[in-house]
Image (cartoon, grey):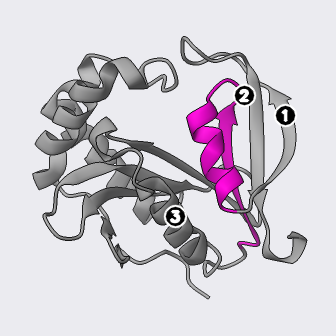
């Protein structure tokens, strides 16, 4: 068992890796291109987030959280050309034995199974971590695109929780999808 996941995960089409300061401009540009799509679902999606300086600060914070074992944040990059496609992360914020996955994707990469491939890869890595027995994906009940990923990958809808609304399109009905190998 491991305390932290690998820095780099390679799949057939993707390189999922820790971000570096060299990625700040590409990430800021992708957020800028996708801001209209992200704002309804992501409370962090602001004009400020489109600035490379904000991404540099976020990357520095992600390094601290990684080192503390709290969050493992990755960029998703095209295997062949190296283009930035989106983000995915594992968060240790759901209590013992579980880890939560979060993600977003550049519109230019949608419809090709990129997020499904990245989530599938992170499920395998998450279950190798010390004490992790379940992987969760949380999303608002109105976010149909985000729901499609756990449905496609064999997660089970465990419960719906009432949460404060953090983004403009959220309903406050928070779906908790669970992948637990011994529960499938």
| First to last magenta residue range | 132-153
For image coordinates 87% across by 41% down, the residue present is: 159
Secondary structure category for the residue under label 2: loop
Q: For mark 2, does the 10 Å Cα neighbourhood hold few (<14), some (14 to 19), or many (20 or more) residues?
A: some
Where is residue 120 shown, x and y percent of the image? 55, 68
51 vs 92, left or right, is left
Question: Which is nearer the N-term, disc 2 or disc 1?
Answer: 2
**Which residue occupies the foreground of this view, 87 or 60?**
87
Which residue is identified by label 1? 160
110 vs 123, left or right, is left
Q: Is residue 138 magenta?
A: yes
Residue lying furthest front: 111
Q: Are marks 3 and 2 in contact (CB under 8 Å)?
A: no
Whether residue 118 is visible: yes
Secondary structure category for the residue under label 1: strand
Q: Are marks 2 and 1 in contact (CB under 8 Å)?
A: yes
Q: For mark 1, does the 10 Å Cα neighbourhood hold few (<14), some (14 to 19), or many (20 or more) residues?
A: some
**Which residue occupies the foreground of this view, 17 or 114?**
114
Where is residue 58 shown, x and y percent of the image? 30, 40
Whether residue 68 is visible: no
Q: For mark 3, does the 10 Å Cα neighbourhood hold few (<14), some (14 to 19), or many (20 or more) residues?
A: some
Which residue is identified by label 2? 141
Q: Is residue 161 magenta?
A: no
């Amino acid at each position: 068992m491991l305390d932290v996941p690998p820095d780099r995960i390679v799949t057939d089409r993707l390189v999922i890796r820790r971000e570096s300061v060299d990625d700040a401009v590409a990430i800021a540009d992708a957020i800028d291109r996708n801001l209209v799509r992200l704002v309804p679902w992501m409370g962090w999606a602001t004009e400020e987030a489109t600035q490379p300086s904000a991404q540099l600060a976020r990357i520095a914070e992600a390094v601290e959280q990684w080192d503390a074992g709290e969050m493992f944040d990755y960029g998703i990059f095209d295997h062949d050309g190296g283009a930035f496609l989106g983000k995915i992360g594992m968060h240790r914020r759901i209590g013992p034995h579980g880890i939560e996955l979060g993600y977003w994707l550049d519109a230019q990469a949608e419809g090709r199974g990129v997020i499904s491939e990245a989530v599938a890869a992170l499920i395998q890595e998450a279950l190798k971590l010390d004490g992790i027995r379940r992987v969760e994906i949380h999303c608002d009940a109105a976010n149909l695109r985000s729901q499609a990923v756990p449905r496609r990958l064999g997660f089970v809808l465990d419960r719906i929780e009432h949460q404060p609304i953090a983004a403009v399109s959220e309903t406050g009905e928070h779906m908790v999808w669970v992948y637990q190998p011994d529960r499938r």
